[in-house]
Amino acid sequence: MQVIHTLAELRSALDAYRHPAVVPTMGNLHAGHIALVRQAKPLGDVTVATIFVNRLQFAPHEDFDTYPRTLEADCKQLQEAGCDIVFAPSEAELYPVAQTFRVQPPDALATILEGHFRPGFFGGVCTVVLKLLAATQARTAVFGKKDYQQLMVIRNMVQQFALPVHIVGGETQRAADGLALSSRNGYLSPDERQRAVLLSQTLHHVVQEVQAGRSSVADIAALEAQSMKTLSDYGWKPDYVHIRRRSDLQAITDTDAVVGHAVVLAAARLGTTRLIDNLEI
């Protein structure tokens, strides 16, 4: 496995390949990332993982400076998974001058849910992903479905810019108790880690209720409110629990088919750690 830090080296290493399959990450890898790499391997003639903590998607109060950088451990996991190339550029390499050209996704998708609570987040994500797809000459790129809204934003960006990249979603990987794997789980105290499973349990309850027939607009509003209260009652600070159309993440209407066409998404803070999760209905 090659570990590459410059664009020039990357382009040279990719000269012999026609169909790179790429997994963009911010490092601090866990089994969920490794599952994406294994999913990518048969989809191209070379497998590339990128590791870059992208300043553009962090707000000033967020954890950019303290986000774990674990390149040596990450590379060990990637090598064991059969990754061919790791592209881990410095900030100066990827942004040699101020990144004044930005990708701005549409407000209808980028200012709801995560975008409402993290203004500018998806603009930062799109800008770096566009740059990484270009740098790696990606023909397939695999992104986790745990970041459901991010996956949709990237798919729409690739489609609207007519990029020759197939975007593949990887299923959310979970711990034995159901907690979605996330780099930020490492911020949880032992007590918080035990309590964190409530988030996925709450989403499972919503899915069961909708599948049992509670799918009108009024039912959905009640389920969302009930879920927020459940989390609050157990010491969480929920940002949202919403049932949305999978197609565009807009609110369900009474004319929409729900089962098989909707997703429940949630974000909540437990202590100082903000967790997100989702389940398709």
Image (cartoon, rainbow, N blue to C red):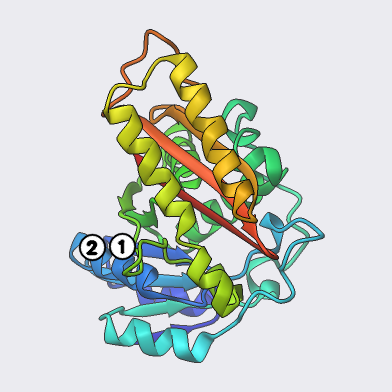
Disc 2 marks which residue? 44
Look at 57% across and 48% down and name the residue there: 231
Q: Amino acid at mark 1?
A: Ala
Q: Amino acid at mark 2?
A: Gly
Residue 141 in the image: above or below residue 96: above
Residue farthest front in this picture? 233
Front-most of residues 167 and 67? 67
Q: Quadrant of residue 32?
A: bottom left
Residue 132 in the image: above or below residue 83: above
Crowding around mark 1 (Cα neighbors within 10 Å: few <14, some 14 to 19, many 20+) is many
- Badge 2 or badge 1: first in the primary sequence: 1
Crowding around mark 2 (Cα neighbors within 10 Å: few <14, some 14 to 19, many 20+) is some
Q: Please state the horizontal and vertical placement of residue 85, each as a whole percent of the image.
A: 37, 79
Look at 45% across and 13% down and name the residue there: 253
Q: Quadrant of residue 21?
A: bottom left
Front-most of residues 237 and 107? 237
Q: Please state the horizontal and vertical placement of residue 42, each as a whole percent of the image.
A: 18, 65
Disc 1 marks which residue? 21
| Circles 2 and 1: CB atoms closer than 8 Å | yes
Q: Is residue 146 visible?
A: no
SS of the residue under disc 1? strand
